[in-house]
Protein backbone atom coordinates (compact mmCIF):
# COMPACT_ATOMS: atom_id res chain seq x y z
CA UNK A 1 0.00 0.00 0.00
CA UNK A 2 1.27 3.48 -0.86
CA UNK A 3 2.34 5.48 2.18
CA UNK A 4 3.56 8.98 2.89
CA UNK A 5 5.16 10.06 6.17
CA UNK A 6 5.98 13.67 6.89
CA UNK A 7 8.28 14.98 9.59
CA UNK A 8 8.38 16.86 11.79
CA UNK A 9 4.71 17.14 12.68
CA UNK A 10 5.24 20.73 13.71
CA UNK A 11 8.12 23.15 13.32
CA UNK A 12 8.63 26.54 14.86
CA UNK A 13 11.21 28.85 13.28
CA UNK A 14 12.37 32.37 13.83
CA UNK A 15 12.12 34.67 10.85
CA UNK A 16 15.22 34.15 8.72
CA UNK A 17 16.02 30.74 10.22
CA UNK A 18 16.26 28.27 7.33
CA UNK A 19 15.16 24.66 7.68
CA UNK A 20 13.82 21.63 5.81
CA UNK A 21 10.66 19.55 5.91
CA UNK A 22 10.83 15.85 5.11
CA UNK A 23 8.46 13.62 3.15
CA UNK A 24 9.28 9.91 3.06
CA UNK A 25 7.27 7.74 0.73
CA UNK A 26 6.67 4.12 -0.14
CA UNK A 27 5.02 3.61 -3.50
CA UNK A 28 5.02 0.94 -6.15
CA UNK A 29 6.44 3.10 -8.91
CA UNK A 30 6.31 6.86 -8.46
CA UNK A 31 4.48 8.85 -11.09
CA UNK A 32 4.80 12.14 -9.25
CA UNK A 33 5.32 13.74 -5.85
CA UNK A 34 3.37 16.87 -5.00
CA UNK A 35 3.82 19.61 -2.42
CA UNK A 36 0.89 21.70 -1.27
CA UNK A 37 0.50 24.54 1.20
CA UNK A 38 -2.65 24.75 3.32
CA UNK A 39 -3.61 27.82 5.33
CA UNK A 40 -6.14 27.49 8.18
CA UNK A 41 -9.69 27.33 6.88
CA UNK A 42 -8.61 27.07 3.25
CA UNK A 43 -8.04 24.41 0.65
CA UNK A 44 -4.58 23.08 -0.23
CA UNK A 45 -2.69 25.30 -2.66
CA UNK A 46 -0.46 23.60 -5.22
CA UNK A 47 3.26 24.37 -4.97
CA UNK A 48 5.36 21.82 -6.88
CA UNK A 49 5.36 18.54 -8.75
CA UNK A 50 8.52 16.40 -8.88
CA UNK A 51 8.72 13.41 -11.19
CA UNK A 52 12.15 11.84 -10.93
CA UNK A 53 15.02 11.47 -8.47
CA UNK A 54 17.42 14.38 -8.65
CA UNK A 55 14.78 16.84 -9.76
CA UNK A 56 14.57 20.20 -8.00
CA UNK A 57 12.06 23.03 -8.20
CA UNK A 58 12.09 26.48 -6.65
CA UNK A 59 9.55 29.14 -5.87
CA UNK A 60 10.54 32.22 -3.91
CA UNK A 61 11.94 30.97 -0.59
CA UNK A 62 10.91 27.35 -1.20
CA UNK A 63 12.93 24.64 -2.89
CA UNK A 64 11.72 21.06 -3.32
CA UNK A 65 14.04 18.14 -4.00
CA UNK A 66 13.40 14.46 -4.68
CA UNK A 67 15.29 11.21 -4.10
CA UNK A 68 14.09 7.63 -4.62
CA UNK A 69 12.77 7.45 -1.07
CA UNK A 70 12.03 10.98 0.10
CA UNK A 71 11.50 14.59 -0.75
CA UNK A 72 12.62 17.69 1.08
CA UNK A 73 11.04 21.11 1.14
CA UNK A 74 13.78 23.59 1.99
CA UNK A 75 12.69 26.96 3.32
CA UNK A 76 15.33 29.65 3.08
CA UNK A 77 15.10 32.73 5.29
CA UNK A 78 11.41 32.18 6.05
CA UNK A 79 9.00 34.99 6.77
CA UNK A 80 5.91 34.93 9.00
CA UNK A 81 3.71 34.67 5.90
CA UNK A 82 5.26 31.26 5.20
CA UNK A 83 3.43 29.92 8.25
CA UNK A 84 1.06 27.18 7.07
CA UNK A 85 0.69 23.42 6.93
CA UNK A 86 2.74 21.86 4.15
CA UNK A 87 1.34 18.68 2.65
CA UNK A 88 3.16 16.10 0.58
CA UNK A 89 1.33 13.64 -1.71
CA UNK A 90 2.36 10.86 -4.07
CA UNK A 91 0.82 9.47 -7.21
CA UNK A 92 1.64 5.88 -8.10
CA UNK A 93 2.11 4.47 -11.57
CA UNK A 94 -0.30 1.61 -11.00
CA UNK A 95 -3.24 3.55 -9.59
CA UNK A 96 -3.81 6.02 -12.37
CA UNK A 97 -3.09 9.67 -12.25
CA UNK A 98 -6.21 10.62 -10.40
CA UNK A 99 -5.29 9.21 -7.01
CA UNK A 100 -3.14 11.26 -4.65
CA UNK A 101 -2.07 9.76 -1.34
CA UNK A 102 -1.35 12.49 1.20
CA UNK A 103 0.81 12.65 4.29
CA UNK A 104 -0.48 14.25 7.47
CA UNK A 105 1.48 17.43 6.91
CA UNK A 106 3.99 19.59 8.74
CA UNK A 107 2.63 22.63 10.57
CA UNK A 108 5.13 25.44 10.18
CA UNK A 109 5.05 28.53 12.38
CA UNK A 110 7.47 31.35 11.61
CA UNK A 111 7.78 33.96 14.33
CA UNK A 112 8.88 37.55 13.63
CA UNK B 1 -12.37 34.50 -11.00
CA UNK B 2 -12.58 31.66 -8.48
CA UNK B 3 -11.13 28.47 -9.95
CA UNK B 4 -12.82 25.80 -7.82
CA UNK B 5 -15.78 26.87 -5.71
CA UNK B 6 -17.92 24.99 -3.20
CA UNK B 7 -21.19 25.71 -1.48
CA UNK B 8 -21.97 25.91 1.31
CA UNK B 9 -18.81 26.77 3.24
CA UNK B 10 -20.36 25.63 6.52
CA UNK B 11 -23.06 23.03 7.06
CA UNK B 12 -24.46 22.14 10.47
CA UNK B 13 -27.10 19.44 10.60
CA UNK B 14 -28.51 16.70 12.76
CA UNK B 15 -27.92 12.98 12.57
CA UNK B 16 -30.16 11.21 10.12
CA UNK B 17 -30.59 14.17 7.79
CA UNK B 18 -29.70 14.21 4.10
CA UNK B 19 -27.52 17.01 2.74
CA UNK B 20 -25.73 18.02 -0.45
CA UNK B 21 -22.54 19.92 -1.21
CA UNK B 22 -22.00 21.52 -4.58
CA UNK B 23 -18.78 22.08 -6.48
CA UNK B 24 -18.01 23.99 -9.65
CA UNK B 25 -14.73 24.57 -11.49
CA UNK B 26 -14.08 27.13 -14.22
CA UNK B 27 -10.62 25.86 -15.17
CA UNK B 28 -11.87 23.77 -18.08
CA UNK B 29 -10.59 20.61 -16.37
CA UNK B 30 -11.94 17.18 -17.24
CA UNK B 31 -11.47 15.45 -13.87
CA UNK B 32 -13.02 16.33 -10.53
CA UNK B 33 -12.62 14.88 -7.05
CA UNK B 34 -14.04 14.77 -3.56
CA UNK B 35 -11.69 14.52 -0.58
CA UNK B 36 -12.41 14.25 3.13
CA UNK B 37 -10.13 15.90 5.70
CA UNK B 38 -10.62 14.61 9.21
CA UNK B 39 -9.97 16.32 12.54
CA UNK B 40 -6.31 15.31 12.37
CA UNK B 41 -6.01 17.09 9.02
CA UNK B 42 -5.53 13.84 7.10
CA UNK B 43 -6.74 14.32 3.52
CA UNK B 44 -8.16 11.23 1.81
CA UNK B 45 -9.67 10.83 -1.63
CA UNK B 46 -13.27 9.67 -1.79
CA UNK B 47 -14.27 9.86 -5.46
CA UNK B 48 -13.02 11.03 -8.81
CA UNK B 49 -14.91 11.67 -12.02
CA UNK B 50 -13.44 12.02 -15.48
CA UNK B 51 -15.73 13.47 -18.13
CA UNK B 52 -18.73 12.63 -15.94
CA UNK B 53 -17.60 9.02 -15.50
CA UNK B 54 -16.84 7.63 -12.04
CA UNK B 55 -13.17 6.57 -11.94
CA UNK B 56 -12.31 6.23 -8.25
CA UNK B 57 -14.59 5.13 -5.42
CA UNK B 58 -12.47 4.62 -2.34
CA UNK B 59 -14.59 2.28 -0.21
CA UNK B 60 -16.83 5.10 0.85
CA UNK B 61 -20.16 4.13 2.48
CA UNK B 62 -22.95 4.07 -0.06
CA UNK B 63 -24.68 6.83 1.91
CA UNK B 64 -22.33 9.08 -0.07
CA UNK B 65 -23.35 9.54 -3.69
CA UNK B 66 -21.47 11.81 -6.07
CA UNK B 67 -23.21 13.21 -9.11
CA UNK B 68 -21.62 14.96 -12.06
CA UNK B 69 -24.16 16.73 -14.27
CA UNK B 70 -21.40 18.03 -16.53
CA UNK B 71 -17.60 18.35 -16.62
CA UNK B 72 -17.62 21.57 -14.61
CA UNK B 73 -19.76 20.35 -11.72
CA UNK B 74 -19.49 17.58 -9.15
CA UNK B 75 -21.95 17.40 -6.29
CA UNK B 76 -21.85 15.22 -3.20
CA UNK B 77 -25.05 13.97 -1.63
CA UNK B 78 -24.95 12.37 1.80
CA UNK B 79 -27.88 10.35 3.16
CA UNK B 80 -28.61 9.52 6.79
CA UNK B 81 -25.79 11.63 8.20
CA UNK B 82 -23.78 10.19 11.09
CA UNK B 83 -21.59 11.85 13.71
CA UNK B 84 -18.50 10.37 12.05
CA UNK B 85 -19.28 12.25 8.84
CA UNK B 86 -18.22 15.49 10.53
CA UNK B 87 -15.18 16.70 8.61
CA UNK B 88 -14.08 19.18 5.99
CA UNK B 89 -14.91 18.10 2.45
CA UNK B 90 -12.81 19.42 -0.41
CA UNK B 91 -13.57 19.39 -4.09
CA UNK B 92 -10.65 19.42 -6.54
CA UNK B 93 -10.07 19.31 -10.26
CA UNK B 94 -7.29 18.47 -12.70
CA UNK B 95 -6.69 18.15 -16.41
CA UNK B 96 -5.35 14.75 -17.43
CA UNK B 97 -4.52 15.49 -21.01
CA UNK B 98 -1.86 18.14 -20.26
CA UNK B 99 0.56 15.52 -18.94
CA UNK B 100 0.82 17.21 -15.57
CA UNK B 101 -1.29 15.86 -12.80
CA UNK B 102 -1.58 18.52 -10.14
CA UNK B 103 -4.98 18.95 -8.58
CA UNK B 104 -6.49 22.29 -7.66
CA UNK B 105 -8.63 22.43 -4.55
CA UNK B 106 -11.68 24.38 -3.54
CA UNK B 107 -12.02 26.22 -0.21
CA UNK B 108 -13.73 23.32 1.55
CA UNK B 109 -17.09 22.70 3.22
CA UNK B 110 -17.01 22.17 6.97
CA UNK B 111 -19.74 19.67 7.84
CA UNK B 112 -20.78 19.33 11.47
CA UNK B 113 -23.24 16.61 12.39
CA UNK B 114 -24.86 16.95 15.82
Image (tube, rainbow, N blue to C red):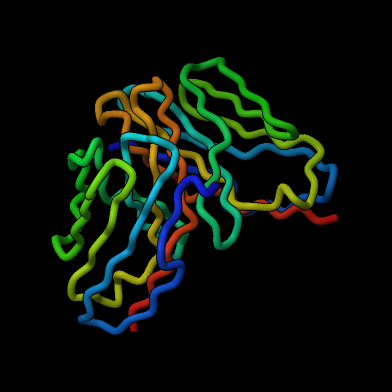
> Observer-nearest residue: B104 or B28?
B28
Residue B15's place in the image compared with A87, above or below, is below
On the question of residue A80 being in view, the answer is yes
Q: Horizontal placement of A13 versus A65: left or right?
A: right
Q: Quadrant of the N terminus of chain A?
A: top left
Identity of the residue drawn at 66% across and 51% down: A108
Identity of the residue drawn at 25% across and 44% down: B70
> Observer-nearest residue: A72 or B81?
B81
- Farthest residue, direction left: B62
Q: Where residue A16 appears, x then y in whole percent?
A: 85, 42
On the question of residue A7 being in view, the answer is no
Badge count = 0
> Observer-nearest residue: B22 or A84?
B22
> Observer-nearest residue: B93 or A78?
B93
Locate residue B36: give its quadrant.
Answer: bottom left
Identity of the residue drawn at 24% across and 75% down: B81
Q: Horizontal placement of B62 versus B90: left or right?
A: left
Q: Where residue B111 appears, x then y in whole percent?
A: 38, 71
Q: Quadrant of the C terminus of chain A?
A: bottom right
Residue B62's place in the image compared with A77, above or below, is below
Identity of the residue drawn at 33% across and 22% down: A29
Q: Horizontal placement of A90 versus A46: left or right?
A: left
Residue A50's place in the image compared with B85, above or below, is above
Q: Where residue A90 appears, x then y in whole percent?
A: 41, 34
Q: Where residue A89 appears, x then y in whole percent?
A: 44, 38
Locate residue A26: give its quadrant.
Answer: top left
Amino acid sequence: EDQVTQSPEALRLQEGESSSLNCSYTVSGLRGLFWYRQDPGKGPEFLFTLYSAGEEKEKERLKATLTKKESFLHITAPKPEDSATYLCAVQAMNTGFQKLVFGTGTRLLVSP
Amino acid sequence: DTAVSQTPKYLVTQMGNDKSIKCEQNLGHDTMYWYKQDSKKFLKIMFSYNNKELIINETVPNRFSPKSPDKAHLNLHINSLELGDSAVYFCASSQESRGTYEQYFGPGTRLTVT
